[in-house]
Image (tube, rainbow, N blue to C red):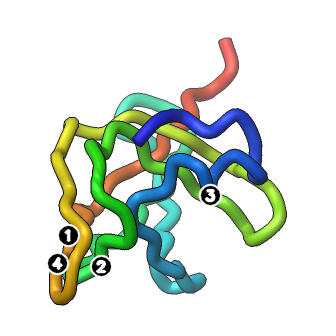
């Protein structure tokens, strides 16, 4: 529901979470330059807390690794309520 400042801050803003495995990341050349990592789509992820999703965060279980914005989406927790995450990429351009 907001950008966490650090790993400890994730719990206060998390609405839904899913564990990713090594196979959920695909490395490739960047669209413009550099390299990119594509994060696989995930479907039917249970919604833990109601709120408006505005950010996606990646962590490794101890450290906040990456945060980005997403299309704002109202989520409602409850039995059987889920959300789908489309595939998305993180791209790092070549240094100038």
| Number of numbered discs on residues | 4
Q: Earlier in the sequence, mark 4 or mark 2?
A: 2
Q: Which image quarter is the N terminus in? A: top left
Q: CA distance from mark 1 to mark 2?
A: 6 Å
Q: What number is the disc on residue 11?
A: 3
Q: CA distance from mark 2 to mark 3?
A: 17 Å
Residue at 69%, 46% (x, y): give it. 9
Q: What number is the disc on residue 45?
A: 2
Q: Earlier in the sequence, mark 3 or mark 4?
A: 3
From the image, state whether disc 4 or disc 2 is nearer to you.
4
Residue 3 in which image quadrant: top right
Q: CA distance from mark 4 to mark 2?
A: 8 Å
Placement of 53 over or under 92, stated as above or below: below
Is the Cβ of the residue at disc 3 closer than 8 Å to that at disc 4?
A: no
Q: Earlier in the sequence, mark 3 or mark 1?
A: 3
Is the Cβ of the residue at disc 1 closer than 8 Å to that at disc 2?
A: yes
Task: Report the residue marked by disc 4.
Answer: 81
The x and y percentages for residue 10 are: 63, 52
Placement of 52 over or under 14, stated as above or below: above
Task: Report the residue marked by disc 1.
Answer: 84
The x and y percentages for residue 22 are: 59, 83
Answer left or right for 96 relative to 76: right
Q: CA distance from mark 3 to mark 1?
A: 20 Å
Q: Which image quarter is the C terminus in? A: top right
Q: Secondary structure at mark 2?
A: strand
Q: Secondary structure at mark 3?
A: helix
- Give whichever of 54, 86 is nearer the camera: 54
Crowdedness near tag 4: few (<14), some (14–19) or many (≥20) residues, C-alpha within 10 Å: few
């Amino acid at each position: 529901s907001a950008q966490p400042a650090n790993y400890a801050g994730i719990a206060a803003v998390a609405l839904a979470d899913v564990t990713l495995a090594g196979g959920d990341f695909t490395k490739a050349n960047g669209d413009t330059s550099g390299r990119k990592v594509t994060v696989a789509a995930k479907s039917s992820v249970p919604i833990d807390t109601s709120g408006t999703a505005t950010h996606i965060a990646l962590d490794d279980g101890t450290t906040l690794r990456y945060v980005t914005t997403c299309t704002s989406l109202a989520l409602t927790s409850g039995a059987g309520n889920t959300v789908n995450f489309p595939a998305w990429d993180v791209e790092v351009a070549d240094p100038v």
